[in-house]
Amino acid sequence: MALCWSFEKICPNRYRLVIIDKVLGCGHSTRALWAPGYESRRLRDIIQASWYLNSNGKLRVDLTDHMVTILDQIKSDALAHGFDI
């Protein structure tokens, strides 16, 4: 299954990092599969996090070492839950 990291808006000015199924076909639509618990009021933080995770750590734009550690933990938790990222 082809998965990628994205975000969803959960309330005004609140966003959550999610994994989505990016395979589209007959009778199949994009949907959020799992929310690892990373939320922010700043959309920029969530977009940077999804860029980092989708690039396998190669795209590290304005991320602190602490944030990278958190995102790597989120990714390893997703892998532990059986998601093939």
Image (spheres, grey):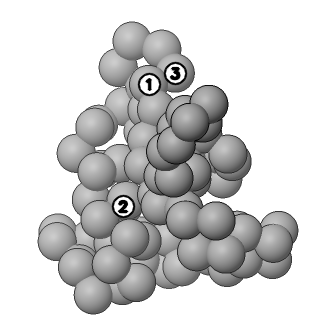
Question: Can you identify the residue that label 3 sits on?
Answer: 10
Mark 2 residue type: Ala
Q: Which mark is residue 49?
A: 2
| Count of labels in the image | 3
Q: Report the residue that reaches farthest toward the left.
A: 61
- How far is mark 2 from mark 3, CA to CA? 17 Å
Mark 3 residue type: Ile
Q: Position of residue 74 (x, y in %)?
A: 61, 68
Q: Report the residue that reaches farthest toward the front.
A: 26
Q: Secondary structure at mark 2?
A: helix
| Residue positioned 27% across, 59% down in the render | 48
- How far is mark 1 from mark 3, CA to CA? 4 Å
Q: Position of residue 63 (x, y in %)?
A: 26, 71
Q: Position of residue 33 (x, y in %)?
A: 67, 45
Q: Is residue 42 left or right of residue 83?
A: left
Question: Can you identify the residue that label 1 sits on?
Answer: 9
User: Could you tell me if the residues under marks 1 and 3 are in contact, i.e. CB atoms within 8 Å?
Assistant: yes
Position of 76 relative to 70 (above/below): below
Q: Secondary structure at mark 3?
A: strand
| Residue positioned 35% across, 20% down in the render | 13
Q: Position of residue 26 (x, y in %)?
A: 56, 36
Binning the other alpha carbons within 10 Å of mark 1 as few (below 14), some (14 to 19) or many (20 upward) gives: some
Q: Is residue 4 left or right of residue 46?
A: right
Which of the two discs, 1 and 2, labels the residue nearer the N terminus?
A: 1
User: Could you tell me if the residues under marks 2 and 3 are in contact, i.e. CB atoms within 8 Å?
Assistant: no
Q: Which mark is residue 47?
A: none
Mark 1 residue type: Lys
